[in-house]
Amino acid sequence: MAISKDLYPSQEDLVYEEEILRNPFSLKLWWRYLIAKAESPFKKRFIIYERALKALPGSYKLWYAYLRERLDIVRNLPVTHPQYDSLNNTFERALVTMHKMPRIWVMYLQTLTIQKLVTRTRRSFDRALCALPVTQHERIWEPYLVFVSQDGIPIETSLRVYRRYLMYDPSHIEEYIEFLVKSERWQESAERLASVLNDDKFYSIKGKTKHKLWMELCELLVHRANVISGLNVDAIIRGGIRKFTDEVGMLWTSLADYYIRKNLLEKARDIYEEGMMKVVTVRDFSVIFDVYSRFEESTVAKRMEMMSSSDEEDENEENGVEADDEDAPPQFFSVGKGAAKEDTEWFLVE
């Protein structure tokens, strides 16, 4: 492909060109040339960058500056623009020699994330983790988790990535639990949260207390009672009642609510009454009593509604039968004396 004459070195560039001809492997000379052409169109700088990188393919300074300028060019372009393909290819060329540089990887991965190239992005993240030492993995995991948390990413892909991340840093289990809840993975979120509470060495990086985590688990178990199995909810909540003294009334009402959702109403009543007998503060007693009262009121209202609808149905059935009797034509039955029609006697049914 022919190069436009506008892109050829000008008379002012000859001094830099002569220096580079004498020493083409000097980063200082190439950099001074680029600074001198800072106001030139990027197409002209593009040629200088490409020539410099051909001579110095291992220069991080040149690659970083070049890629930054390429990123600025595509910033306001749609992701379907051909410039993005060219940029991706440039990143791949850079990584041939820059594969140990986490900053280059992060720039590339963030660019792929914007383009929503799911498979290519995931594979590139995995390549980065393989290429970089473990001490620098944290710089890759942060944008990796941002990527898998986006809409449109298959849930199984996100789960696999989060599980791998927990193998690298188990202290971020809370982020994984939040992701499970957001993804409506109720069973695993409850199991993970229960395992956290059973771990005496666990320390919340989000600053949550054991009591706060316990209340979250109780809320999860109660509100998703019909989809969570394999956990002894009664024992878990009673364990919290024995362990904590704050908001015990809420724990008792949560346990009763669990049985209500399981449609075990008598068991729920037993829990309410047991809770009122065992709490030691007026506040906890009031909490249980208020919830118990509302429960009984709703139960009575439901029964009255059912009785009312049942009475209406009975009344409608009776009225329907009477109306049918009045409007129906006379009914007859026959007693045949013989095979002939004239031998048949007809009687009116009263």
Image (cartoon, helix red, strand yellow):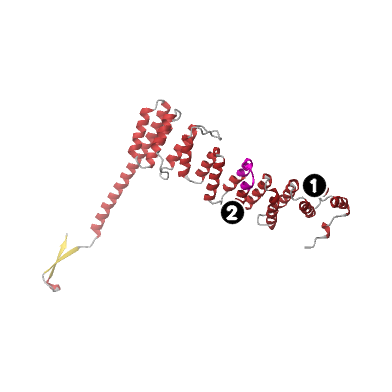
Amino acid under label 1? Leu
Residue that badge 1 annotates:
27
In this image, 20 relative to 169: left or right?
right
Residues packed near mark 2 inside 10 Å, few (<14), some (14 to 19) or many (20 plus)? few
Q: Nearer the viewer, residue 158 or 30?
A: 30
Point out the residue furthest to the bottom here.
340
Residue at 41%, 35% (x, y): give it. Answer: 237
Magenta span contains residue 140 = yes
Q: Position of residue 261 (x, y in %)?
A: 39, 42
Please state the extent of the stretch shown in magenta in the rendering: 128-142
User: Does residue 198 appear anywhere in the picture?
Assistant: yes
In this image, 221 relative to 146: left or right?
left
Describe the element under mark 2 as helix, strand or loop: helix
Answer above or below: position of 300 versus 159. Answer: above
Say which quadrant the C terminus sits in.
bottom left
Q: What is the distance, in whole Å, between disc 1 and disc 2 at their CAs?
A: 37 Å
Q: Position of residue 182 (x, y in %)?
A: 51, 44
Residue 286's disc is: none
Picture quadrant where residue 300 is located: top left
Residue that badge 2 annotates:
119
